Amino acid sequence: MASRSGSTLWRWLHEDAIRPWYQRSWIFPRDPEFATKAGRVLDLYAREWQGSSLKEDEFVISADEKTSIPARRRKHRTQNCGPHTPMRVEHEYFRCGAWTYIAALDVHHARIFGRCEAKNGLAPFDRLVDQVMTRPPYNDARRVFWIVDNCSAHRGVKAAERLRDRYRRLTLVHAPIHAPSRGDPGAVGFLWLCPRFPASCPGIKSTMALRGSPPSQTPPCRFPAAGSSNGTPRTRPGVRNPGW
């Protein structure tokens, strides 16, 4: 095969009608309110809501979940590198279950809040909301808009009412069905920053959220993009710190 020319390979592909570059995975919009919902999301990213510009004390949060992230533990401790000796990392590992990583992105200030949970659901998502809404500047903001998809943890009017009962300044905004992972900049940014669980990550039996654990109790799994061990978010390099 290596001796065949490129033109020969292209001819074979055309003769067999194998043309993967002509095909693209696609989800056709099925949400009857697709344009309306997408317009609300785009307006919020442009710092507008219902035709009015957002105030300085109004914030936009985009939240998403990444489920079934495998947690693995190496069968032998990693050996640090030394003079003329590279780092040695054990190839085999133990499977330690799976985690769900839930994150919220302040889209205009590039601040990320994240936590690990044993599974996704109402209670884990509410804990993320509490993590964000109980700290400044969100705890005394005029309004905080949360852009979410339509998963069961925050779907529909009931979810909006539940969260509004907890925080009267919170406004839940749903993206169109199937839209966030493909068109929502916040969700795309979250997936880009979402960590991959390293081999040293503890087993699934440890149910405490890594982001909320004291430094002395935090397992050896670190997530720099999600903030420090005390839950304080970190600003991405090159982004102006607004002062809080």
Image (spheres, helix red, strand yellow):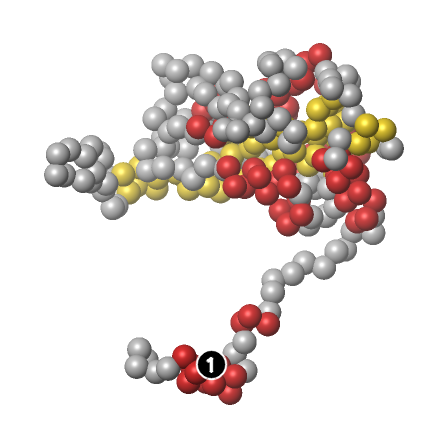
Q: Looking at the figure, which quarter contains the N terminus?
A: bottom left
Q: Quadrant of the C terminus?
A: top right
Residue 212: x, y in percent? 49, 19
x, y (%) of residue 237?
50, 28
Position of 214 compared to 36: left or right? left
Task: Judge by depth and name the residue closer to the eye, 229 or 153.
Answer: 229
Q: Amino acid at mark 1?
A: Trp
Q: Foreground residue, 221 or 100?
A: 221
In percent of width and height, residue 99 lies at 47, 36
Residue drawn 62% across and 18% down?
A: 242
Q: Is residue 104 visible?
A: no
Task: Identify the residue position indicated by label 1 in the image.
Answer: 10
Q: Secondary structure at mark 1?
A: helix
Name the side, left or right, on which 158 lies relative to 206.
Answer: right
Q: Is residue 51 left or right of residue 158?
A: right
| Mark count | 1
Q: Residue at x 36, y 14 (%)?
A: 216
